[in-house]
């Protein structure tokens, strides 16, 4: 081994504590990069294979009713490969607990199982024409409710209970993420499921003899899907199109893609932040080492070692830290990639296509580590070039000192205690280092704010959506539009404080070439259950004519208040209408448009018909209406809140996991800066001991410096954390969910407490260093 390499090994051994702490940061960075990059790739491959294996539909069309023969004729449209009709209806499911509300979506299945959206099961998934008493149950729902093959489920269809035997359990690529609708905050597989029934049985019980209410369309490759949609709209205009959903907009697929985007973002951003902090620490460490090795560097140069060799000797120190951490991080990342990939595929109910380690990720991870470590090594050891052999033989000339700007404020300075004066002077004589450490600690603070914001944002989103913007206790959906007089019947059935009619129907909103299919909701102009708040926080009232749209719709259509949009009406006999955007309002779950119910009846639908009601009551409507006909769903805000609370309990685990990242950064920064300070200022501390300061006083001075740094870092970290939160809000917001950009003081207070906690832990870890410091040796080495 070369002499310089032997010296390098001694350097590493002497600073093993700092070496380990920085290597851990690099290891965490590379572990996150390899783990989530590999998981993202495995999940994408599994999804792609699953979609191909089950032949997932590229278009799903919801209609009022379409004859069976028409669906077969649609294959003649250019660009369409295959079409499959089906019936899909949500109904309540009777369970043992009368207070529990469970809905189930019954979907018809062709006798042969169908060619599009095929079920994934080890058994044959088809339903025969005589299978009128059996169902195939979706796996997530079956597991959540512990239902097995041979068990009986009892859906209530049009007021009548049917006993259906579970003949099989299967998965579906259409429901990898099982959610009832866009208004649902999180999945609740025990509350909502999917069951597949025979086509004959569905047509019989739902009154769709010889017809369907949904179509699955498989298009050919390399076709413009928008052209296909235009052709379908023209062909199906008279059959009452409700909605045409592309695969990219399909609820389950959309959420899955958002999760993939989130994993990819985490694999790209967090590792870079960790490597930046590691580079800052390495640079400061090397600067201190070079300063202490001044005489040794002069001797090396006198013996014939050139500037480049000596400089590379110190760069190898930074590379040794980086590569050690990288090897550990990559190894752990590869080990964890399998379990995490399996976790995601189980969570999304997707068969794992296989575990694949992309060697390109390992290469990029090592390359990125080498770049950061080399750069930090050059920055920290650049003074090597300026050290001359002759000059290095004598002590370095003291730096010229001058009074700091604070000292010039004599009225303030004369009242500052001596120990605090030393703290302030030390901070101001190492301004660059202090700034770097503050930046690193501010990044740790910013990382802590993000998970804490998520917790607050989710809670605020629920409370605003269902406490302030929507104030009903229940919403009831009818199986088909009913006359408004149904409200009188409901009043006779239930004990309600208020009942308000509502119409909810999907329409396509368009502006020029831009379009978007959303549920348009009609409510009374002076609604008691809906509060509309514009983007400035002002309450706005629904106009007689005009439409309110959410911010997501406004951005998608690129329209503002006062613009005119087109509502395309596919209901037979009804025309498209031009309507003015009267306001843009806040809505955090889903994307809807609201119109005065009277205007909606007149312009878009039929007069005196409603599709549901909103109710305020203290009664248990699920029990009171369980035998009522023509009711497809009774949705309770209390049920949603209970499901939301369960979700928040799980979220706390994720918050702790993310805050650990910020804690590792904060700990490493404070630990290393303290070790460096002790090493650099050993003579100074020895002098203080002679002056009568005890070890506790010396340790207190270092602690004050670190807490001053932490305080400034928290102040700097507030706008940094706000920027990180804003970036996350923009990247995660979609048509399904818009996170509120609400910066609560509690978020920053909790992040500050977490940051200070890890600073204290790091301080305690260095306590032994101060108490073991030989102050006499420090003075002797300085005198000699």
Image: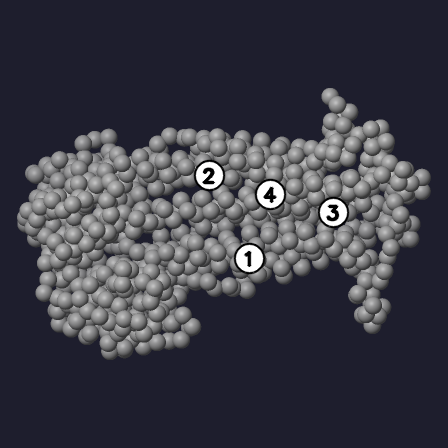
Helix, strand or loop status at disc 2: helix
Residue at point 28% right, 45% down? 175
Of mark 2 and mark 3, the one earlier in the sequence is 2
Left or right? Give the position of 170 relative to 486: right
Question: Position of 301 compared to 92: left or right?
Answer: right
- Pointer 2 with pointer 4, Cβ within 8 A: no
Q: Residue at x 19, y 75 (%)?
A: 598
Q: Badges 4 and 1: C-beta atoms under 8 Å apart?
A: no
Callout 2: few (<14), some (14-19), or many (20+) C-alpha neighbours within 10 Å? many
Task: Give the residue number, with chain letter if any, for mark 1.
Answer: 721
Q: Is residue 634 visible?
A: no
Residue 275: mark in rendering: 4
Q: Give the labeled residue for mark 3.
A: 674
Q: Earlier in the sequence, mark 2 or mark 4?
A: 2
Q: Which residue corresponds to mark 2?
A: 37
Residue ID at (83%, 68%) = 408
Front one among 226 and 92: 226
């Amino acid at each position: 081994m070369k002499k310089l390499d032997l010296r390098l090994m001694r350097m590493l051994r002497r600073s093993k504590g700092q070496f380990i702490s920085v290597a851990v940061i690099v290891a965490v960075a590379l572990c996150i990069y390899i783990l989530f990059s590999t998981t993202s790739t495995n999940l994408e491959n599994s999804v792609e294979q699953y979609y191909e294996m089950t032949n997932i539909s590229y278009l799903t069309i919801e209609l009022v009713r379409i004859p069976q023969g028409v669906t077969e004729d649609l294959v003649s449209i250019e660009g369409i490969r295959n079409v499959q009709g089906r019936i899909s209806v949500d109904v309540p499911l009777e369970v043992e607990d009368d207070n529990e509300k469970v809905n189930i979506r019954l979907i018809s299945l062709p006798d042969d199982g169908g060619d599009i959206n095929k079920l994934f099961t080890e058994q044959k998934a088809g339903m025969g024409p005589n299978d009128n008493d059996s169902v195939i149950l979706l796996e997530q729902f079956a597991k959540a409710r512990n239902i097995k093959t041979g068990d009986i489920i009892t859906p209530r269809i049009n007021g009548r209970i049917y006993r259906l035997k579970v003949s099989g359990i299967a998965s579906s690529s259409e429901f990898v993420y099982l959610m009832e609708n866009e208004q649902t905050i999180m999945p609740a597989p025990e509350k909502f499921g999917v069951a597949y029934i025979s086509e004959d049985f569905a047509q019989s019980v739902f009154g769709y003899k010889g017809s369907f209410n949904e179509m699955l369309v498989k298009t050919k490759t390399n076709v413009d899907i928008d052209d296909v949609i235009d052709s379908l709209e023209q062909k199906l205009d008279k059959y009452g199109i409700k909605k045409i959903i592309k695969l990219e907009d399909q609820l389950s697929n959309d959420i899955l893609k958002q999760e993939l985007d989130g994993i990819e973002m985490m694999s790209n951003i967090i590792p870079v932040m960790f490597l930046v902090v590691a580079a800052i620490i390495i640079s400061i460490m090397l600067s201190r080492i070079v300063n202490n090795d001044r005489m040794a560097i002069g001797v090396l140069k006198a013996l014939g070692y050139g500037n480049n060799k000596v400089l590379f000797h110190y760069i190898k120190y930074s590379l040794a830290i980086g590569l050690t951490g990288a090897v550990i991080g990559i190894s752990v990342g590869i080990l964890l990639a399998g379990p995490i990939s399996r976790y995601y595929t189980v969570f999304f109910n997707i068969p794992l296509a296989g575990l694949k380690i992309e060697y390109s990720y390992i290469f990029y991870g090592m390359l990125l580590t080498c770049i950061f470590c080399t750069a930090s090594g050059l920055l920290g050891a650049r003074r090597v070039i300026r050290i001359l052999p002759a000059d290095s033989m004598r002590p370095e000339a003291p730096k010229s000192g001058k009074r700091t700007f604070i000292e010039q404020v004599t009225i303030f300075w004369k009242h500052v205690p001596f120990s605090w004066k030393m703290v302030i002077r030390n901070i101001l004589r190492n301004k660059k280092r202090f700034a770097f450490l503050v930046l690193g600690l501010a990044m740790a603070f910013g990382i802590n704010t993000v998970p804490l914001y998520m917790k607050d944002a989710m809670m605020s989103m629920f409370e605003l959506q269902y406490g302030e913007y929507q104030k009903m206790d229940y919403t009831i959906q009818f199986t088909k539009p009913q006359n408004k007089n149904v409200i009188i019947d409901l009043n006779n059935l239930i004990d309600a404080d208020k009942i308000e009619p509502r119409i909810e129907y999907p329409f396509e909103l368009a502006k020029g070439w831009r379009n978007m299919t959303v549920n348009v909701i009609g409510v009374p102009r002076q609604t008691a259950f809906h509060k509309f708040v514009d983007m400035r926080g002002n309450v706005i009232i629904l106009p007689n004519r005009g439409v309110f749209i959410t911010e997501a719709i406004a951005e998608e259509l690129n329209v503002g208040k006062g613009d005119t949009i087109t509502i395309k009406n596919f209901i037979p006999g009804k025309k498209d209408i031009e309507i003015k955007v009267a306001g843009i309002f806040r809505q955090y779950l889903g994307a809807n448009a609201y119109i005065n119910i009277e205007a909606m009846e007149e312009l878009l639908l039929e007069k005196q018909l409603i599709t549901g009601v909103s109710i305020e009551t203290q009664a248990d409507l699920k029990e009171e209406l369980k035998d009522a006909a023509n009711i497809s769903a009774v949705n309770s805000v209390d049920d949603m809140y209970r499901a939301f609370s369960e979700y928040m309990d799980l979220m706390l685990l994720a918050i702790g996991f993310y805050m650990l990242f910020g804690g590792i950064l904060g700990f490493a920064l404070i630990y290393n800066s303290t070790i460096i300070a002790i090493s650099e200022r050993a003579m100074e501390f020895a002098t203080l001991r002679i002056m009568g300061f005890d070890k506790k006083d010396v340790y207190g001075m270092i602690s004050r410096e670190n807490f001053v740094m932490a305080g400034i870092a928290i102040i700097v970290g507030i706008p940094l954390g706000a920027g990180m939160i804003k970036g996350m809000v923009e990247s995660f917001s979609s048509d399904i969910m818009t996170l509120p950009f609400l910066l609560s003081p509690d978020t920053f207070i909790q992040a500050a407490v977490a940051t200070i906690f890890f600073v204290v832990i790091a301080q305690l870890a260095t306590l032994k260093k101060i108490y073991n410091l030989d102050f006499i040796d420090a003075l002797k080495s300085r005198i000699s």
